[in-house]
């Protein structure tokens, strides 16, 4: 489960990118564990992103250690969909790049 054969991936890198809904993400890192392309990074939420959240989302994020998933390597995504399936909060969607 941790490794995906490249032929299982649906697209060439950069066609599809994962988008993380920071209102739902709790930084549990399931996406980072299953991603064969190392697209995800789990880290403290950026100040600007935190300030754009509502009060309830800010509270929830504090309860979960202020950690969220970011996608610094989104252009490496091959649309295997493992991150979408692995995320317990259903915080990840795959969309066409650009």
Image (cartoon, rainbow, N blue to C red):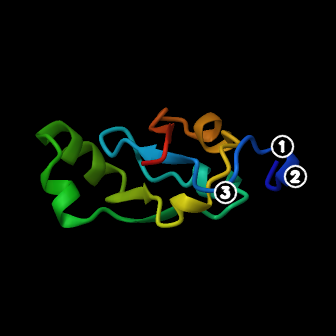
Give the label on residue 85, or none. none
Comes first in the chain, label 3 or label 2: 2
* Residue beneath the point at 49% across and 32% down: 90
Which residue, given by chain and number where applicable, does mark 3 sit on? Answer: 33
Q: What secondary structure is found at the residue carrying circle 3?
A: helix
Most foreground residue, 56 or 95: 95
Q: Is residue 93 left or right of residue 10?
A: left
Q: What secondary structure is found at the residue carrying circle 1?
A: helix
Q: Is residue 35 left or right of residue 44?
A: right
Q: Residues within 10 Å of mark 1 (few under 14, many from 20)?
A: few
Query: Could you tell me how far apart the alpha carbons at marks 2 and 1 are, in whole angstroms?
Result: 5 Å
The answer to the question of whether label 2 and label 1 lie on touching residues, with beta carbons closer than 8 A, is yes
Which residue, given by chain and number where applicable, does mark 1 sit on? Answer: 8
Q: Could you tell me residue 3's position as x and y percent?
A: 82, 56
Q: From the image, state whether disc 3 or disc 2 is nearer to you.
A: 2
The answer to the question of whether label 1 and label 3 lie on touching residues, with beta carbons closer than 8 A, is no
Q: Could you tell me residue 36's position as x and y percent?
A: 73, 58
Query: Residue 35, located in which quarter of the rendered image?
Result: bottom right
Comes first in the chain, label 1 or label 3: 1
Q: Is residue 89 above or below residue 29?
A: above
Q: From the image, state whether disc 1 or disc 3 is nearer to you.
A: 1
Which residue, given by chain and number where applicable, does mark 2 sit on? Answer: 5
Q: Is residue 80 left or right of residue 96?
A: right
Q: Could you tell me residue 93's position as x and y percent?
A: 49, 36
């Amino acid at each position: 489960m941790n490794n995906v054969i490249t032929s299982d991936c649906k697209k060439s890198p950069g066609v599809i990118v994962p988008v993380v809904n920071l209102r739902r993400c709790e930084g549990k890192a399931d996406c980072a564990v299953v991603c064969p392309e190392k697209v995800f990074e789990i880290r403290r939420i950026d100040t600007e992103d935190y300030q754009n959240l509502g009060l309830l989302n800010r509270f929830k994020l504090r309860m979960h250690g202020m950690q969220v998933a970011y996608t610094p390597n989104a252009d490496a995504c091959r649309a295997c969909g493992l991150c979408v399936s692995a995320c317990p909060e259903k915080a990840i969607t795959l969309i066409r790049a650009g």
